Image (cartoon, grey):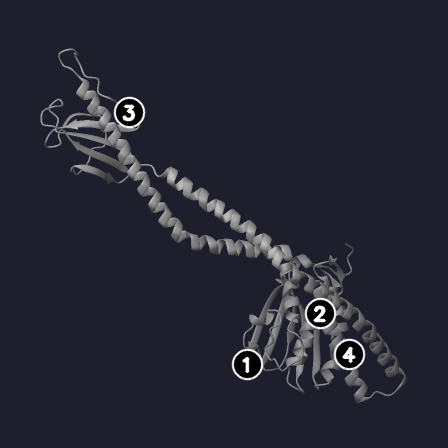
């Protein structure tokens, strides 16, 4: 994962956690703001009731024929008798209970104010009502939360990038060191392999030479895994037509000497007349890692079966070993995980295989029995198959 992507991912995570922490104080703040809003609304209703009372005080029956009852936008009011029967009212939604003071029912607010006896058109109470709307409160809280989240995210992203700079430099030096080391390893490894082959052609076979040869092939497989890990995000792996049967036979032959060190025999049953449209480097990583693991985890003087056959679901490639089996078939694809820590290797082979499978849409079934062995079944979909020797 790139450093910027890492910082972005962690900035999102940190912002989410801060948002969760802020929920409690924001809830308290929201309740507080709603209380303030309700107090302000109560004051508003009292002001409107005072205006109505003033208007009724100024009304003179001797000089005016009718009283123009005050009306307000978004506020309703009315005059009621002692038993809260309406004398005159503009309130469309009457209260279910009546008592002097300020009341809130559902989303409506009511203010009940007592009047002097028989002074205002025979009314004993004036009731002022309006609809409560907390939209402004929620809007303010949302804006505060949004501002905090954006600020926290920006600061998190900036500081994570700043804090990661020393680690970036260390990683760059480490990457360069690994690349240089891989290059330096490749040259002597190639020389060893070439000279072993030349010596083997001119002299009689020796068990010591065979051991050296097997060890160099094991080392080559580890080198190829490391090289793939370094280059796989920087290179485009081009697909081409591959004679899978011949390709597989060549890789089995390559590992014969490695298997012979444990007196293991590799049996091949290759029955398929279809070419595979795939990348040779990625295909080699799948085959080599399976063969290498099968040899590594098989019992001595046992066998390994490699099977290739055509089925309706696609082309099936199977590797079967006779070893201790797998305790957890899901964990084996995690990077650096090893079932047996006493075995050699870094635990990266099957992780590479998993990444190639996911990219190409290859299905895998793992069948394993403790102390009996494991079988890895790869199914290449029909989309990756072409008629043998056909031109693309």
Q: Are marks 1 and 3 in contact (CB under 8 Å)?
A: no
Tag 4: Cα neighbours inside 10 Å, few (<14), some, or many (≥20)?
some
To which quarter of the image does residue 304 belong?
Answer: bottom right
Mark 4 or mark 1: whose residue is earlier in sequence: 4
Q: Is residue 82 left or right of residue 93?
A: left
Residue highlighted by disc 1? 370
Of badges 4 and 3, the one in the foreground is 3
Q: Is residue 192 left or right of residue 234?
A: right
Residue highlighted by disc 4? 216
Q: Where 363 sits versus 68, above or below?
A: below
* Residue visible at 22% across and 24% down in the picture: 52
Residue highlighted by disc 2? 225
Tag 3: Cα neighbours inside 10 Å, few (<14), some, or many (≥20)?
few
Q: CA distance from mark 1 to mark 3?
A: 84 Å
What mark, if any, has residue 140 been given in the picture?
none
Q: Nearer the viewer, residue 320 or 20?
A: 20
């Amino acid at each position: 994962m790139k450093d910027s992507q890492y910082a972005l991912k962690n900035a999102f995570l940190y912002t989410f956690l801060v948002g969760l922490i802020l929920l409690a104080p924001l809830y308290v703040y929201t309740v507080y703001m709603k209380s303030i809003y309700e107090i302000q609304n109560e004051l508003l209703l009292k002001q409107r009731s005072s205006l109505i009372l003033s208007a009724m005080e100024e009304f003179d029956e001797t000089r005016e024929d009718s009283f123009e009852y005050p009306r307000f936008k978004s506020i309703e009011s009315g005059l009621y008798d002692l038993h809260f029967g309406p004398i005159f009212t503009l309130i469309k939604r009457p209260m279910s209970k009546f008592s002097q003071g300020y009341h809130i029912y559902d989303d409506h607010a009511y203010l009940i104010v007592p009047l002097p006896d028989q002074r205002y058109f025979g009314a004993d109470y004036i009731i002022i009502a309006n609809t409560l709307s907390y939209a402004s409160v929620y809007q303010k809280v949302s804006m505060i939360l949004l501002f905090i989240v954006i600020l926290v995210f920006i600061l998190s992203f900036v500081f994570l990038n700043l804090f990661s700079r020393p680690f970036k430099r260390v990683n760059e030096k480490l990457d360069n060191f690994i690349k240089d080391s891989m290059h330096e390893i490749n040259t002597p490894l190639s020389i060893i392999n070439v000279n072993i082959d030349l010596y083997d052609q001119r002299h009689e076979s020796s068990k010591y030479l065979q051991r050296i040869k097997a060890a160099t092939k094991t080392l080559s497989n580890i080198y190829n895994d490391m090289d793939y890990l370094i280059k796989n995000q920087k290179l485009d792996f081009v697909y081409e037509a591959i004679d899978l049967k011949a390709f597989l036979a060549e890789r089995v032959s390559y590992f014969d000497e490695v298997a012979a060190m444990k007196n293991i025999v590799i049996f091949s049953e290759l029955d398929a007349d279809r070419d595979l449209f795939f990348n040779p480097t990625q295909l080699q990583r799948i085959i080599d890692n399976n063969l290498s693991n099968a040899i590594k985890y098989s019992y001595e003087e046992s066998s390994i079966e490699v099977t290739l056959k055509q089925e309706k679901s696609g082309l099936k490639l199977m590797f079967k070993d006779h070893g201790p089996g797998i305790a957890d078939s899901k964990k084996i694809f995690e990077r650096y995980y090893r079932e047996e820590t006493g075995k050699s290797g870094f635990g990266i082979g099957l992780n590479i295989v998993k990444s190639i499978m996911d990219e190409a849409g290859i299905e895998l079934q793992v069948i394993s029995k403790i102390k009996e062995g494991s079988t890895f079944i790869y199914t290449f979909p029909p989309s990756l198959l072409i008629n043998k020797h056909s031109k693309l």
